[in-house]
Amino acid sequence: MSIIILDTNCSNLLSIKLSIEKLGYNPVITTDVHIIQRAKKIFIPGVGSASEIMKQFSKNNLLINTLKNVTCPTLGICLGMQVMSSFSDESGGIDMLGIIDTPVVLLQSGMFPLPHTGWNQVFFNKYHPLFHNIKSGEWFYFLHSYVFSINQYTVAHTTYNTIFSSVIQKNNFFGVQFHPEKSGVIGSKLLLNFLEM
């Protein structure tokens, strides 16, 4: 199977690659459009800022168009999920890929510190293939300050002063706000569910 990790020039590329390799797959890190077009599964990782990831993507307009039109299951992780949005309030406001017509906004954390860092629970109301053999309310590792609000594409939610979308899906595009590669056995299970989907 052709497994692609999109080279977003961010710091968690290697940890995602190693996590997938431990599951018995051999992912390739690339921005080569021809390889991406033949992929069976795509991962969009992200650690950093909205402006930096969009600057990286904007170096290659063909890459942006290719990402918008892929038909294979595609999983965005943390900032890689947020990049699917229409717009992000981060970095003074920036247009994103527009795959999901919903903006990303600053997490209203109240008395809690930002970024939202550490373990938190993820709740879902009905079965979803990403959560095969995973219970609602399991703990995953988060590190972020911006979020998708609850919307029509919300699959699961998390509370940190306010409720936000911790998993989204639109057609073949999936996104998780947490880091499965840093979430131990449960995170590995979610990655495997995606790979076997």
Image (cartoon, helix red, strand yellow):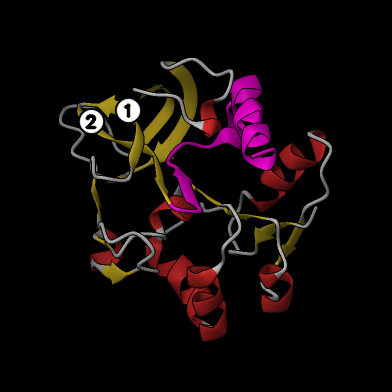
Q: Residues within 10 Å of mark 1 (few under 14, many from 20)?
A: many
Q: Amino acid at mark 1?
A: Thr
| Label drawn at residue 158 | 1
* Image spot of residue 61 (x, y percent): 51, 84
Q: Is label 2 in a helix, a strand or a loop?
A: strand
Instruction: Pick out the residue farthest to the left.
Output: 110
* Mark 2 vs 1: CB contact within 8 A: yes
The residue at 24%/44% (across/down) is 151
Residue 82 quadrant: bottom left
| Left or right relative to 157: residue 83 | right
Residue 164 quadrant: top left
* Image spot of residue 170 (x, y percent): 40, 52
Q: Residues within 10 Å of mark 2 (few under 14, many from 20)?
A: some
**Mark 2 lies on residue:** 163
| Label drawn at residue 76 | none
Q: Amino acid at mark 2?
A: Ile
The residue at 28%/61% (across/down) is 101
* Image spot of residue 100 (x, y percent): 34, 59
> How many marks are shown on the rendered structure?
2
Q: Is residue 169 magenta?
A: no
Highlighted range, magenta: 171-197
Q: Is label 1 in a helix, a strand or a loop?
A: strand
Please state which of residues 137 and 71 is positioned toward the viewer in this rendering: 71
The residue at 45%/53% (across/down) is 171
The residue at 18%/38% (across/down) is 108
Residue 37 quadrant: bottom right
Quadrant position of the C terminus in the picture:
top right
| Left or right relative to 9: residue 38 | right
C-alpha span from label 2 to label 1:
6 Å
